[in-house]
Image (cartoon, grey):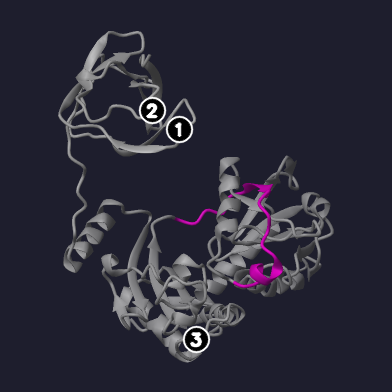
Amino acid sequence: MGGHRTREKSIPINKNRLLTFTLPSTRHSARPILNTPMAAWPASLRISPNQIAHNQLIYKNYQLYNSQFSATTNHPFRRFRLPSSHLGIVRLSNQAQSLINFTTPIMEVPLLSCEEAIERLRLSRERHKGKQQFLAMYSSIFGGITTDPAAMVIPMDDHMVHRGHGIFDTATIVEGHLYELDQHLDRCVRSASMAKISLPFDRETMRSILIQTVSASKCRNGSLRYWLSAGHGDFHLSPSGCAESTFYAIVTQSSTSSDHTGIKVITSSIPIKPPVFATMKSVNYLPNALCQMEAEENGCFASIWLDSEGFVAEGPNMNVAFVTYDKELMMPRFDKILSGCTAKRVLKLSQELVKKGDIRGVSTRDVTVEEGKNAEEMMLFGSGVLVRPIVQWDDQVIGNGNEGPVARALLELLLQDMKSGPSTVRTPIPY
């Protein structure tokens, strides 16, 4: 009594299509018959796509290869290959039967020479140009500067890539000068010490490399970013197998203009990094990225983190500040968050507003959410946003819902400082 019965298999083809077919099995063998032409199978194939424009489906140069499928019974997952060059009967939902032609070999991955790989990198860069232009890069691995974007790569075995063991910093290029290079570089060295990354060069050599990289780029207005990594050499957890730490720098020029109009923010639901990690500028920016994505998904510019005690902390990559109705400029303390170079500079420049009587004082202290939402002004500070006024936080309108006078005054002071400030904050580039 070895009668046949059928069971159904389903294979996801892509997000919107499901290939379902019925195969025979007997009580003696639960394995489907896969090595015979589909026309000989005692069953039909049924495809149920979300949308099909035509009844006739012809699949050329396509083969289901090593796909996983499961039976409706408790059989384990199996791997299979549908035989090529065979026709099978296909039944479309509410449509007549058609033929599918499974004919095709598996795509072969080419083995590339170094020159061919670089050329493909170059073509990829050309095809996918974004808003940023990559003008020059320094790498301590090849010990020099390149202006070819195709060569601006780092090894996969660099511990900064596969372990997140690296730190980074930035400096803005304004009219042929690096703004606050030394302040950012000092923070970079502190972060490296916290991350237990030894410096591949002394500080002055690193500084010279950064200036020379900007010079080679010919960029007069843009951004300098640089990284220190535990090094490359293996995929282990510890960097003990790395020969030495690595240093990278890259100069970019953005095609977007600065926007200083009022924005909306929300309170982030993403857990903030603990102080030991939040106070160093490491490459571990996954929480920051999720924080920013959460804001964008809610139609806002940024999210605001709260610390473990519920006080206002910072944004995903900028500091936050407030102006009370009695004209106090207040900012959260830096002991649990990143010490923003732009924020610290703005605090210093704000003394000019104190002298003029526009504000009565400046403080860094714990700020409650209630204080923040009831402030007259709220703003973000950062090298990417400079000074950006906030007009709404969650459902609370800040002040009168417009950009405030203190934010505008601080932005003017910062822009002036970036273009004509003292030599302590402006480093000329010898082009």
Residue 17 placed where, x, y %? 37, 26
User: Looking at the image, is mark 2 or mark 1 nearer the viewer?
Assistant: 2
Calculate the distance from the C-alpha at mark 1 to the C-alpha at mark 3: 56 Å
Q: Which part of the image, by quadrant, shows the N terminus? A: top left
Q: Is residue 166 visible?
A: no
User: Looking at the image, is mark 3 or mark 2 nearer the viewer?
Assistant: 2
Q: Nearer the viewer, residue 382 or 204?
A: 204
Q: Residue at x 57, y 41 (%)?
A: 297
Inspect the image, locate mark 3, and give the three-letter code of the amino acid beneath it.
Leu
Please give the range of residues in magenta.
257-280
* Horizontal arrangement in the rendering, residue 250 relative to residue 363 (left or right): left
Q: Earlier in the sequence, mark 1 or mark 3?
A: 1
Q: Residues within 10 Å of mark 3 (few under 14, many from 20)?
A: some
Q: Residue at x 37, y 77 (%)?
A: 214
Which quadrant of the structure image shows residue 154?
bottom left
Calculate the distance from the C-alpha at mark 3 to the C-alpha at mark 2: 63 Å
Q: Which residue is mark 3?
A: 199
Q: Which residue is mark 2?
A: 30
Calculate the distance from the C-alpha at mark 2 to the C-alpha at mark 1: 8 Å
Residue 431 placed where, x, y %? 33, 81
Q: Which residue is mark 1?
A: 75
* Horizontal arrangement in the rendering, residue 388 relative to residue 309 (left or right): left
Residue 330 placed where, x, y %? 77, 64
Residue 271 placed where, x, y %? 68, 55
